[in-house]
Amino acid sequence: MGVRLHVNVDHVATLRQARGTPYPDPVEAALRCERAGAHGITVHLREDRRHIQDADVEALRRRLRTLLNLEMAATDDMVAIALRIRPDIVTLVPERRQERTTEGGLDVVGQHDALSRVVDELQHAHIAVHLFVEPDPDALRAALRTGARGVELHTGAYAAADAEPERTRQLQRLATAGRWLRAESTTVRIAAGHGLTLQNVGPLLRAVPEIEELNIGHALVSDAVFVGLDAAVGAYLAAIAGARP
Ligand code: PXP
């Protein structure tokens, strides 16, 4: 099966919150992405509710035909919301400084026990949990030990590396991470995201053949300003298919 594209529609909500208007509606945007071929929709319900609101997540749960991936912090409040709304996937992400590693993934080593409890609680309720982690050996090892069904590799450092040799170094880090994860677990779901664009997604998929799922938001929504959402989703699907025929 090909690589799944999950479109993150947070920044449609950013535009709405900038004016406090009812438009543009991230739920309508999500439905359009689905019609254009996206395999799922991702939203980040932040503690400060700066873009996506609780009502958006509820409406997405009712109206999506594909899959809902809810990104959230591992807090009691967020776990209660997830248990009520029941997304298909919860991706745990850091929101506060102490929850992050130096580069920005979850501090899975330092927060292992707390994260494991959240993973257990959500997966017991049949919600698959993914952990958003740096492609570093210690973080990956700790992520697998939590029992989470999936790992989302943080591609932010790769996306930010616009020159050689740093770009190749970051791709190699991700390639090593993908290989290591698959060697350790035949079942863990391997996703990737953050800062991915039409230009950098192909080289990533070619370098890391283990990636099964991508979460792409900011660049895709930005492209949509010029070409429309349908065409933007189509362009990313074509770039993915081009890298993984
Ligand atoms: N994956 C995770 C875990 C994220 O937190 C984000 C940003 O919300 C993304 C993917 C999407 O990143 P971008 O908006 O840069 O495509």
Image: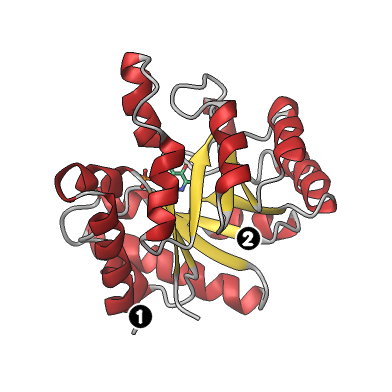
Q: Residues within 10 Å of mark 1 (few under 14, many from 20)?
A: some
- Determine the quadrant in which ligand 1 lies: top left
Q: Is residue 43 left or right of residue 119?
A: left
- Residue 23: x and y in percent read 35, 26
Residue under the point 66% across and 55% down:
143
Question: In the shown orientation, is residue 209 left or right of residue 166?
Answer: right
Circle 2/circle 1 CB separation < 8 Å: no
Residue 37 x %, y %:
40, 64
SS of the residue under disc 2? strand
Depth check, front residue: 221 or 92: 221
Instruction: Specify how the rendered protein is coloured.
Output: secondary structure
Element at badge 1? Answer: loop
Q: Amino acid at mark 1?
A: Arg
Q: Which mark is residue 150?
A: 2
Q: Amino acid at mark 2?
A: Gly
**Picture mark count:** 2
Residue tagged by mark 1?
Answer: 244
Q: Closer to the observer: label 2 or label 1?
A: 1
How far across and how far down the image is residue 128, in percent?
70, 56
Residue ID at (69%, 61%): 149
Where 28 falls versus 14 (above or below)? below
N-terminal label among 2 and 1: 2
Q: Residue furthest top?
A: 20
Determine whether, in the image, residue 110 is placed left or right of residue 42: right
Separation of residues labelled 2 and 1 (CA atoms):
21 Å
Looking at the figure, which quarter contains the C terminus? bottom left
Q: Residue at x 55, y 49 (%)?
A: 132
Is the shortest distance between ligand 1 and the CB of mark 2 under 8 Å? no
How far across and down, in percent of the image, does residue 108 sit?
64, 45
